[in-house]
Amino acid sequence: MSAGYEVAVRAEAELGEGPTWDPATGRLIWLDILSMRVQTYDPATGRRTLRTTEQHVGAVKPRAGGGLVLNLRDGVGLLDPDDGFRWLHHEPVAGRRANDAAVAPDGSLWAGTMRYDEAPGGGTLTRLTGDGTTETVLSDVTVSNGTGWSPDGRLMYYTDTPTRRVDVFDYDGERVHGRRTLVEIEQGAGFPDGLTVDADGCVWVALWDGGAVRRYTPHGVLDRVVSLPAPRTTACAFGGADLTDLYVTTARVGLSSPHPLAGSLLVIPDAGQGLPQPAFQG
């Protein structure tokens, strides 16, 4: 197993985020939230694409029938394969924007929000189905971030970044309960941001201001750390044809003297075995 990293895409994203492998196209989707950019990267050819959105975009995921679902500042929208756009759920709130999102085993989208000023309790985590039905799962969130499910679909992991915790819930196929702490990141090591779960049920979490991704066992034991040069590592996801390469997004926002690779898309080859991610059923 390789312990190092490579540069997949050298870039200067303000707030690189949301890496997601799209098996239908063989490409990695990733974002620059603040620059309103949706990008793709094909590791087989090196080909890249760039699309701009009309407002800040927190997450983009593939849809089962083709196209994309976008977690946008003013709600969740659907982009069809022919580039037609429509709102699935339109709920603009002054001072609030979308952040990370994930697709659950049942194909629903769990979309997070946060306030631009990061006011405590100003964000939410909402479950959306393909017919536009919404349910607020958590209403007292500050910076809604990483969300992922165990291989058997019985547990959900979640990060509200300022808490410094990765929490775990029991998941019944639609709802969560029994919230408890999986791990608390120690002072000085950064803040937990985006996460992904591997085939062993271990949780990989990117550490904002920590310059690293960590792997924790399902019992919360730290068993691997990969240090990276960009201090603001934001999220991680497995990709590649065999789902063995861990892609990591980074940011340069707020840094007075950013590292040359801050804002780039990095990759840790042969990091482990990822899980196929469900597409949004809508």
Image: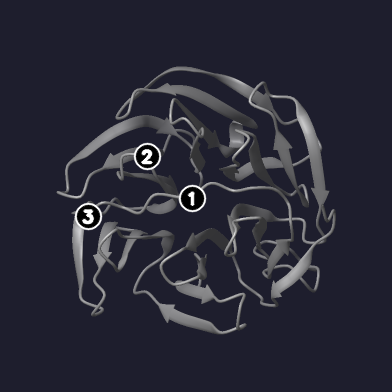
Q: Residues within 10 Å of mark 3 (few under 14, many from 20)?
A: many
In what element is the residue under mark 3?
Answer: loop
Tell me if 282 is positioned left or right of 149 in this view. left
- Which residue is under mark 3? 282
Location of residue 122 in the rendering, given as x and y in whole percent from the top left corner: 41, 39
Q: Specify which label sits upstream in the sequence, 1 or 3.
A: 1
- Which residue is under mark 1? 276
Tell me if 81 is positioned left or right of 187 in this view. left
Q: Specify which label sits upstream in the sequence, 3 or 2.
A: 2
Q: Which of the labelled discs sits on residue 194, or is there none?
A: none
> Can you tell which of label 1 and label 2 is closer to the viewer?
1
**269, above or below 216, in the image:** below
Tell me if 104 is positioned left or right of 2 in this view. left
- How many numbered discs, if any? 3
How far apart, in angstroms, are the residues tagged by discs 3 and 2? 14 Å
Q: Which of the labelled discs sits on residue 105, or is there none?
A: 2
